[in-house]
Image (spheres, rainbow, N blue to C red):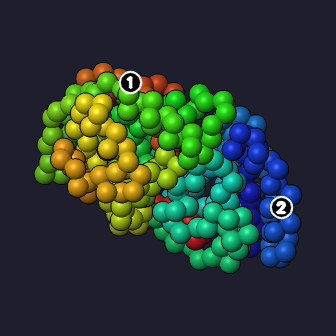
Amino acid sequence: MCIAVVLNPAADRGRATEKEVAIARGLKAHGVSFEIFRTEAPGHATELARKALEEGFSIVAAAGGDGTVNEVAQALVNTEAALGVIPIGSGNDFVKAVGIPKALPQALEVLCRGRVKEVDVGVVETEGGARRYFFNCFGAGIDGQIALDYKRMRYLRGELGYLWAAVLEVIRFRGVRARVEAEGFSYEGKVALLPLQNGPFAGGGFHVAPGASPDDGLLDMVIVDDRSIPRRFPLLKRFRDGTYFRLPGIKRLHVKEARVELERSLPAHLDGEVLPRPVARLRAEVVPGALKVVA
């Protein structure tokens, strides 16, 4: 076994670099061959993952949060190499979906002794034909704005940071008219939230799609009608514990493909990473079993 570790030193507000020694020590204890590649800028993790593939590594592990996982996995879709995850970032929702422990010693044990399984990949195509993969979640409503707020934060990180951003947007986000087309389904109305989930969690622990499975060949789509600020706060609590779907004005679909048109462009995120430009039109689809993961 030969493992390339793509380490994002900036993950968790720069605290990820402090764990490099522990990662190297743990991998040596398991007797595996490895090399650590350090990212230097946004997007660099994808380049390093491609370099690792060219050098013949059979496993490329993302050491960071969900953003690092997203960048590394972009290079591994439809290849024979497997994605490993060392969850040392501030947001670690993907590992919950695939069953990788968050604690470092246990995560390294899975990386070195786990089995390779295939999981689905989401694809989003936005205006201009730009296509990008997501592996846990996509959002272009209030959740896209929350991801943007979180990115701009200087101090709060992890679950608390996402929660604070969510409270801010519950108060100030303006609902948007949306048209949604999916297999046998059509919707038009004013929405606050429109996430697509490959896994059950998003935003550092919000239980957006209870029971969502990353290997069922489907994406879970949630449509939340817009509502007044007083009625948004109970919804926020329900999204924390996964019981939101009991409230009125909630629709949940299992889709292979969906098209969305928004009346105005909104910030959007892939696995918590904000896209370079806001979006107004998009098409999303699932590619079953396109990514191998050590879990």
Residue 208 on image: x %, y %: 38, 52
Q: Is residue 282 visible?
A: no
Disc 2 secondary structure class: helix
Q: Left or right: where does residue 109 sit relative to residue 76?
A: right
Front residue (pair 112, 223): 223
The image quadrant that residue 178 belongs to is top left
Q: Which residue is mark 1?
A: 172
Front residue (pair 148, 173): 173
The image quadrant that residue 138 belongs to is top left
Q: Left or right: where does residue 236 sit relative to residue 82?
A: left
Residue 89 on image: x %, y %: 66, 49
Q: Left or right: where does residue 271 sit relative to residue 16?
A: left
Disc 1 secondary structure class: helix
* Quarter of the picture holding the C terminus: bottom right
Q: Residue placed at 53% from the left, 69% from the top? A: 99
Q: Is residue 151 visible?
A: yes
Front residue (pair 39, 206): 206
Q: Which mark is residue 22?
A: 2
Q: Residue placed at 38% from the left, 28% from the top? A: 171
Q: Residue placed at 59% from the left, 28% from the top? A: 152
Q: Left or right: where does residue 232 sit relative to residue 70?
A: left
